[in-house]
Amino acid sequence: MLAVYFLLGMHTPYAQEAPKAAPAAVRYDVQVNAPRALATLLRDNLDLERWRGNPRIDMAQLARMVKDAPEQVRTLVETEGYYSPQIEARLDTSGATPVARISVDPGTPTTVSTVEIELHGFATEGAGEPFDPAALRKDWALPSGRRFRNADWETAKRDLLRQVNRSRFARAQLAESRATVDPAAHTAALRIVVDSGPDVHFGQLNLVGLNRYPRTVVTNLNKITPGDPYSEADLQAFQTRLQDTGYFSSVEVSLDSSGQEAATAEAPNSAALTLPVLVRVTENKQRNVESGVGYSTNTGMRGQVAYNDLNVAGTRLKSRLLLQQRQQTGRADFYWPTTAQGYEYSVGGGIDRTDVEGQVLNVASVSGTRAWGTPRLQQSLTLEALTELRTLDDEPGIRSKSLPLTYSITKRELDNLVTPKRGYVLSGQLGGALLPVLTDRQFVRAYARAFLLRPLGTDFTLVLRAEAGAVASKSKAGVPATFLFRAGGDQSVRGYGYQELGVREDGAVAGGRYIATGSAELQYWFKPTWGAAVFYDAGNAADRVADLRPKVGYGVGARWRSPAGPINVDVAYGQAVRKVRLHFSLGFTF
């Protein structure tokens, strides 16, 4: 009969003592009387709960589990810092269903009395500052006076070692870690000894997985020089730069430890160790086609087709055709690999047709851009040649051409670029057509935008937006409407149509020389990913600063932190037009 039990998978300490004649199974309840956090811990881990409802548990096995329960309880509550608990476990058979009753008085929790952190090694060779041991003690996560829990103890040790491993001493280890508990005094004395291991430096670059694209795609983005002290931040920054190129579906940048034993054997007594930088990449397909459909309350229904080729005469081609009810765009751009100095050059061209508020714009352009920086601080310089045909209602079209040069800068400090919960973004543009070359009207244009996201407690978030812009020229005539300003819409002044706010000309809304808008929004998150909002927007565009009389919109909205970014649905009232309008948007405009 025992052999049958093993074949069926019944492998418990109680099943081994089961009699040959199977006794009757017993159904029982478990009652735990303990502080809430401990009660949850016990219910999740006690054998009494784990085997409850198993048809092979009989009364004898149940009694044995009740007898063993105090020792199990003691072991579990010690992990929470209680080393002198009062525990009672008994089996109540007075009712129709037996009840295992567990009572726990945990007593006084244990607190940390002293912390001793001892560092061995940490010798450095060559230039650079040695590791600062004081920083380890300052950032230690379980200081004196803090409640001692086993989980916190393990986390603190792990964080301490990780802090050391991030800079120079990538092979550091815990040589000793000891927590001495005094149950009578309810204290724990902690001792940690960290052995630094060798002072690690970067070696040569080893590249694996690159077959289709030139090696310079990787090497030009490598800011690490052989001999530099090891830094985890440098590896992560290198990996991020490679991921952002678009050439690879996956990138892993790490130290190449395959030759560590040989390097150690060559210089067994050396305090320094040089390890290569290993880059493993998986290349994206060279060509791909993407398509999609969507809807925007700004521009209506849309369909899109994109074609990308990662190797066209040594450049990346990105092209797309976007068809919307109010706007149609076709564009292609060619990007050269980032240079060793960190610059990315591109050229492109496209056509665009927009029909909004009685103004129809047909624009054809070609441009060249030099971009540099990081996702946190991006800069670019763009020279563009464009020709534009502007039509207001049924009036004859007005043609203009221009050759503007524009400098752009964006500063981001966000906790997450896709679904941020705190931070800010500042962006600005300064440029214009300054020379009478391929230009009907010389002008200077400045534009700035600010975005702030700040939590207020645990459930509320404040969102602030503001923008301002100005165009200076002898006359507005001849300045392409592309460089003038209009306001209104999902990411502007809600309660008004897309680009509804501007200068009235012949029954249509045209762009103005100046713009100023602002928005204040308070979000309430009743669940981690679901929230509601109230907001107040104001702003306008005009040809004179004195005419920038703000148009006000306000309302309520729903928020969802989706994996693709924040989804916003707003119902806004435009006070100037006395209309209610629905707005839908995905993500924030940075």
Image (cartoon, rainbow, N blue to C red):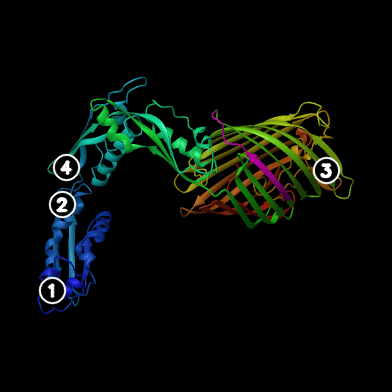
Mark 3 or mark 2: which is in front? Answer: 3
Residue that carries the numbered disc 2 in the rendered image: 85
Mark 4 or mark 1: which is in front? Answer: 1
Query: Tag 1 or tag 4, which sits nearer the N-term?
Result: 1
Residue at 9% x, 75% y is 19
Q: Disc 2 and disc 4: Cα gap in Å?
A: 11 Å
Disc number for residue 2: 1
Mark 3 or mark 4: which is in front? Answer: 3
Q: Is residue 49 left or right of residue 441?
A: left
Q: Which residue type does callout 3 highlight? A: Leu
Disc number for residue 389: 3
Disc number for residue 186: 4
464 over 164 or under it: above or below: below
Q: Disc 3 and disc 4: Cα gap in Å?
A: 82 Å
Q: Which residue type does callout 4 highlight? A: His
Q: Is residue 333 magenta?
A: yes
Q: Using the rendered image of the protein, determine whether residue 192 is visible from the camera's viewpoint.
A: yes
Mark 1 or mark 2: which is in front? Answer: 1
